[in-house]
């Protein structure tokens, strides 16, 4: 997997315990096209500290260009930002 670390707009939900689950996100590629990607399955959830910043790491699966892709998303708690981390 290639490290990307690109900020995205995310739609997510949280349950009564405060557990966050990503649903779908929007990103703009290099050619300025807008893509909306639905997250089909969350495979893993972890928490890590990166340079002192707490982050939730999600290993997810989506269908992108008619192929199943497994990749990682990160949620930074201090800034409340979502990132595509590895794809």
Image (spheres, grey):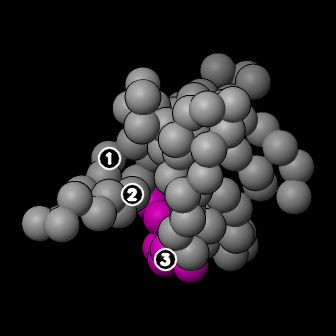
Residues under numbered marks 3 and 1 in contact, where contact means CB atoms less than 8 Å apart: no
Identify the secondary structure beneath mark 1: strand
Among the two numbered marks 1 and 2 on one chain, the one whose residue lies closer to the N terminus: 1
Q: At x 88% / y 49%, what residue is drawn?
A: 2
Q: Residue furthest right?
A: 2
- Distance between the Cα atoms at labels 1 and 2? 6 Å
Determine whether 47 is above or below 5 in the image: below
Comes first in the chain, label 3 or label 1? 1
Residue indicated by mark 3: 41
The residue segment tinted magenta is 38-43
Q: Which mark is residue 22?
A: 2
Q: Which residue is mark 1?
A: 11
Q: 39 or 54, which lies in front?
A: 54
Mark 1, Cα crowd under 10 Å, few <14 / some 14-19 / many 20+, is few
Estimate the x, y position of residue 27 in percent, counting from the top left: 55, 34
Vertical placement of residue 28 versus 16, above or below: above
Question: Few, some or many C-alpha atoms within 10 Å of disc 2 (few <14, some 14-19, many ≥20)?
Answer: many
Q: CA distance from mark 3 to mark 2?
A: 9 Å
> In the image, what residue occupies the spot 56% across and 75% down?
44
Residue drawn at (56%, 33%), measured in percent from left and top?
Answer: 53
> In terms of sequence position, does the residue under pointer 3 or pointer 2 come before the other?
2
Q: Secondary structure at mark 3?
A: strand
Q: Is residue 18 above or below residue 51?
A: below
Which is more toward the observer, 71 or 77? 77
**x%, y% of residue 25?**
45, 46
Quadrant holding the N terminus: bottom right
C-alpha separation, residue under disc 3 versus residue under disc 1: 14 Å
């Amino acid at each position: 997997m290639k490290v990307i670390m690109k900020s995205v707009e995310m739609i997510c939900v949280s349950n009564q315990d405060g557990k966050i689950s990503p649903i779908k996100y929007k990103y703009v590629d290099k050619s300025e096209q807008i893509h909306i990607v639905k997250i089909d399955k969350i495979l893993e959830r972890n928490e890590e500290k990166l340079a002192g910043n707490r982050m939730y790491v999600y290993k997810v699966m989506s269908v992108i260009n008619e192929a199943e892709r497994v990749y990682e998303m990160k949620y930074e708690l201090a800034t409340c930002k979502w990132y595509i981390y590895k794809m």
